[in-house]
Image: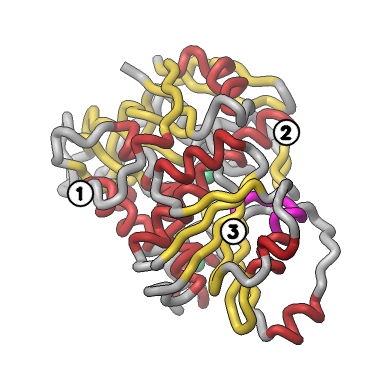
């Protein structure tokens, strides 16, 4: 039997027992290494939904996970038992027009683990043991790289995709609003891409400390800064806070001709100064999940070109998932909380 953390509805998180399915020829049985609790997992827990995606049957959350190979199907060649692996939660169909155009994150038939966007839901990885196709797995052979770090590949891929969407940032100033996990990942991605100067904004001092710890050159309490202080700071702004006020900061801070990338989820209706985009020739771009960036993230983590360790604020056993979720909800204490098995 295997333990699974399951959300049955708003504030109804249970630990269920289940039996992992039998292995097909290209399947791999994994033991959970570490599983990061993401903002979307917290929304499922707190509200039983993320925007339009409503929990309609018990949902195992978790899409940021690493694992250890327990057993392999008869034809598996990518991994062997005992190996640590990074797990890509994204399953684009590979056949639709978007997939064929190289934009798998926009797939029409996406199956993304730990998500209620489809029904039956795509069950996630906050479970002791689970089965994954070998194509989703990358073995990590560096002995010193931890399962906690490997589990950060997915959120790092989101930061990398946000910067990818911004276009070349070499030599530029990049402003990131939001010093949570995705904001910090965006700070690191901007540095990796050659930004000359990275500024982070937040309304929480702990978040700003985190942003500094991962390489922000300057931090600003955006709730205390006036418009003059924020004006014309950056060629590129990354909105990773998911708040209208932070979007306002991006609009003020982005120089004429610059780019704004929205990676955070904003409320459904936001007052938007469209004329400011027009008159200042700003480009406004969305960034949704990631595609090739997942493999880039794995590579950056296994070489420690990007060091995600400062972001892992706590690790709790899967059996204490409820405590882990409650801790993750507290931004004054938490950046990335992970559930772990051992
Ligand atoms: Zn996530
Ligand atoms: Zn597709």
Task: State whether residue 207 is above or below residue 245.
Answer: above
* Numbered badge on residue 263: 3
- Which image quarter is the C terminus in? top left
On screen, residue 273 versus residue 114, left or right, reads right
Pointers 1 and 2 in contact (C-beta within 8 Å): no
Which residues make up the magenta segment? 240-247
The mark that comes first in sequence, 3 or 2, is 2
| Pick the front one: 27 or 166 | 166
List x then y, in percent, for residue 229: 67, 61
Nearer to us of marks 3 and 2 is 3
User: Is there any visible trace of residue 285 in the rendered image?
Assistant: no
Residue 303 numbered mark, or none:
1
Q: Which residue is mark 2?
A: 48
Query: In terms of image quadrants, where is residue 114?
Result: top right
Q: Residues within 10 Å of mark 2 (few under 14, many from 20)?
A: many
**Disc marking residue 339:** none
> On the rendered image, what quadrant is the N terminus found in?
top left
Instruction: Determine whether, in the image, residue 318 is placed left or right of residue 255.
Output: left
Q: Quadrant of residue 45?
A: top right
Q: Residues within 10 Å of mark 3 (few under 14, many from 20)?
A: many
The residue that appears at 37% across and 25% down in the rendered structure is: 129
242 within the magenta span: yes
Point out the tag, 1 or 2, that comes first from the N-terminus: 2
Ligand 1 within 8 A of label 3's CB?
A: no
Among the two numbered marks 3 and 1 on one chain, the one whose residue lies closer to the N terminus: 3
Name the secondary structure under disc 2: loop
- Please tell me which residue lies in front, 181 or 73: 181
SS for callout 1:
loop
Contact flag, marks 3 and 2 (Cβ < 8 Å): no
């Amino acid at each position: 039997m295997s333990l699974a953390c399951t959300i049955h509805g708003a504030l109804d998180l249970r630990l269920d027992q289940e039996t992992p399915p039998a292995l097909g020829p290209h399947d791999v049985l994994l033991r959970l290494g570490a599983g990061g609790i993401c903002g979307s997992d917290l929304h499922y827990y707190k509200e039983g939904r993320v925007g339009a995606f409503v929990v309609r049957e018990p949902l195992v959350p978790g899409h940021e996970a690493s694992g250890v190979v327990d057993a392999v199907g008869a034809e598996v060649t990518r991994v062997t038992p005992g190996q640590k692996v990074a797990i890509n939660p994204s399953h684009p169909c590979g056949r639709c027009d978007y997939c064929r155009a190289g934009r798998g994150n926009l797939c029409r038939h996406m199956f993304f683990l730990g998500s209620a966007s489809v029904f039956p839901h795509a069950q996630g990885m906050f479970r002791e043991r689970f089965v994954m196709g070998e194509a989703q797995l990358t073995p990590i052979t560096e002995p010193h790289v931890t399962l906690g770090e490997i589990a950060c590949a997915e959120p790092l891929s989101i930061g990398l995709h946000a910067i990818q969407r911004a276009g070349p940032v070499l030599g530029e100033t990049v402003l990131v609003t939001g010093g949570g996990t995705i904001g910090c990942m965006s700070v690191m991605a901007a540095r990796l891409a050659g930004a000359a100067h990275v500024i982070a904004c937040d309304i929480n001092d702990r978040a700003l400390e985190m942003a500094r710890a991962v390489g922000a050159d300057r931090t600003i309490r955006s709730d205390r800064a006036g418009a003059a202080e924020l004006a014309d700071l950056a060629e590129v702004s990354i909105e990773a806070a998911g708040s209208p006020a932070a979007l306002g900061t991006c609009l003020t801070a982005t120089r004429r001709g610059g780019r704004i990338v929205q990676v955070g989820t904003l409320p459904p209706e936001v007052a938007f100064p469209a004329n400011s985009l027009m008159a200042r020739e700003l480009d406004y771009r969305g960034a949704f999940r990631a595609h090739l960036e997942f493999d880039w993230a794995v590579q950056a983590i296994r070489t420690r070109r990007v060091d995600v360790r400062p972001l892992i604020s706590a690790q709790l056993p899967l059996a204490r998932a409820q405590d882990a979720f409650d801790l993750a909800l507290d931004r004054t204490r938490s950046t990335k909380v992970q559930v772990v098995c051992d």
